[in-house]
Amino acid sequence: MTTNPGDDPHVRLLLGAYVLDALDPEETCRVARHLRTCDSCARDYVETAEASLLLALLRAEDLGE
């Protein structure tokens, strides 16, 4: 792993924001383009998307103190 995320050609650090549709249009295109050609990042995307869906099912009561 590099110390500067900008040096990494992969998009793993952007996947959470991509799943939440929180990237600007240029970044969204970059991630989408990369996911079409990188199986490793595509697998990470699926895991991130699934985690996001599961988190959306939680209720405040489920997080109890």
Image (tube, rainbow, N blue to C red):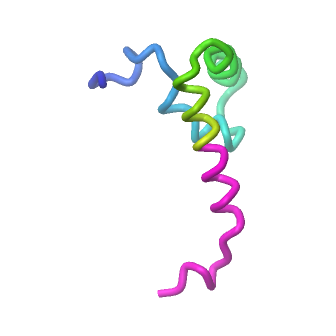
Q: Residue at x 38, y 24 (%)?
A: 5
Q: Is residue 12 above or below residue 47?
A: above
Quadrant of res 16: top right
Left or right of 16? Residue 5 is: left
When the figure is inspected, residue 6 is found, relative to residue 60, above or below; the finding is: above
Which residue corresponds to the image point at 52% horizontal and 24% vertical from the top-left? 40
Image quadrant holding the N terminus, namely top left
Judging depth in this view, the residue of 58 and 18 nearest the camera is 58
Range of residues picked out in magenta = 48-65
- Above or below — where is 45 with respect to 3? below
Q: Residue furthest left?
A: 3
- Is residue 52 on the magenta stretch? yes
Q: Position of residue 7 (x, y in %)?
A: 37, 15
The number of numbered discs placed on residues in the rendered structure image is 0
Between 3 and 41, the one nearer to me in the picture: 41
Compared with 12, 6 (above or below) is: above
Q: Residue at x 64, y 20 (%)?
A: 35
x then y, percent, for residue 65: 47, 87
Q: Position of residue 29 (x, y in %)?
A: 70, 18
Q: Provide the major secondary structure of the magenta segment.
A: helix
Asked whether 47 falls inside the magenta stretch, the response is no
